[in-house]
């Protein structure tokens, strides 16, 4: 009987010890799991912060590249007669497509140079000039989008195309006349500066991407037509 009691006592003691040990392990697991969760949350926050920083750096690099590209376009794209630099050359594969637009970065870089040439030094006037002219420039691009689809529709109808070209030219004239009127009314430019600005921006005022594209296309076609005549003349001269 005493043996049985002793065995039962040992068994009960073992069960209690196992229970206490299990409780201790449970507490340690919870503690370790909590520490892991905190570490994981901290790592996630650090990763998110690094991602945001990388994105910000990438955006800054992109803007910097835009400014550098704009500067290169501005410095390399001026016309010989002092006209405003337009992106693209004179060949059909170099000019912008009908309805295309120029980035704001390039517009702003170009206008900064124009204001320097006009000796427009007052900061408030420079801001007004840039806002005004950029707006007119963008309005002319919107008009070009409209005209691009019209031109494509009536490309083979000379009479209709001529009438639409007149409408296009009138719309451009109104855009720039309104711009000039506001520049004068707000006393942004004096008479000499306004005259110089009109001369500098003549090509921008009178032509859009669609005009330049199809002019270059016709010029290229005319060159192709003249090539056989040129070759024949060279043969005859031999």
Image: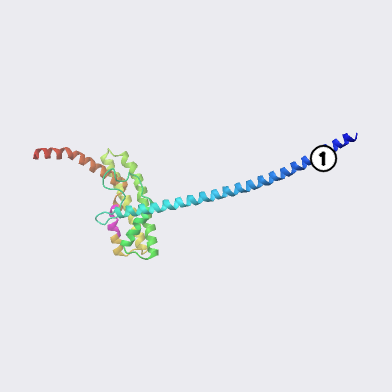
175 falls in the magenta region: no
Residue at image location 85% in from the left, 35% down from the top:
7
Vertically, is 112 above or below 146? Answer: below
Number of marks in the image?
1
- Nearest the eye: 157 or 62: 62
Q: Is residue 32 left or right of residue 93?
A: right
Vertically, is 41 above or below 124? Answer: above
Residue labelled with disc 1? 13
Q: Position of residue 79 (x, y in %)?
A: 26, 54
Q: Position of residue 223 (x, y in %)?
A: 20, 41
Residue at image location 39% in from the left, 61% down from the top:
127
Q: Position of residue 187 (x, y in %)?
A: 36, 64
- State the quadrant of the C terminus: top left
- Nearest the eye: 103 or 53: 53
Span shown in magenta: 197-203
Q: Is residue 136 visible?
A: no
Element assignment for label 1: helix
Local crowd size for mark 1, using a 10 Å CA cut-off: few (<14), some (14–19), many (≥20): few
């Amino acid at each position: 009987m005493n043996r049985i009691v002793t065995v039962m006592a040992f068994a009960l003691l073992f069960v209690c010890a196992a229970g206490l040990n299990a409780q201790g392990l449970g507490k340690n697991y919870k503690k370790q799991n909590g520490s892991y969760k905190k570490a994981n949350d901290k790592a996630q926050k650090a990763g998110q912060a690094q991602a945001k920083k990388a994105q910000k750096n990438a955006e800054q690099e992109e803007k910097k590249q835009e400014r550098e590209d704009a500067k290169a376009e501005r410095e390399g794209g001026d016309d010989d007669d002092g006209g405003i630099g337009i992106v693209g050359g004179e060949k059909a594969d170099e000019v912008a497509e009908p309805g295309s637009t120029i980035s704001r970065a390039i517009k702003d870089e170009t206008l900064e140079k124009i204001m320097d040439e006009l000796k427009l030094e007052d900061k408030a006037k420079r801001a007004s000039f840039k806002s005004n002219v950029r707006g007119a420039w963008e309005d002319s691009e919107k008009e070009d989008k409209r005209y691009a689809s019209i031109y494509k529709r009536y490309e083979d109808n000379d009479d209709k195309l001529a009438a639409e070209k007149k409408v296009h030219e009138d719309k451009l004239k109104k855009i720039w006349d309104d711009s000039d009127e506001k520049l004068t009314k707000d006393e942004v430019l004096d008479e000499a500066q306004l005259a110089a600005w009109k001369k500098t921006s003549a090509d921008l005022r009178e032509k859009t991407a669609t005009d330049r594209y199809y002019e270059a296309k016709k010029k290229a076609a005319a060159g192709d037509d003249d090539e056989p005549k040129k070759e024949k003349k060279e043969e005859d001269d031999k």
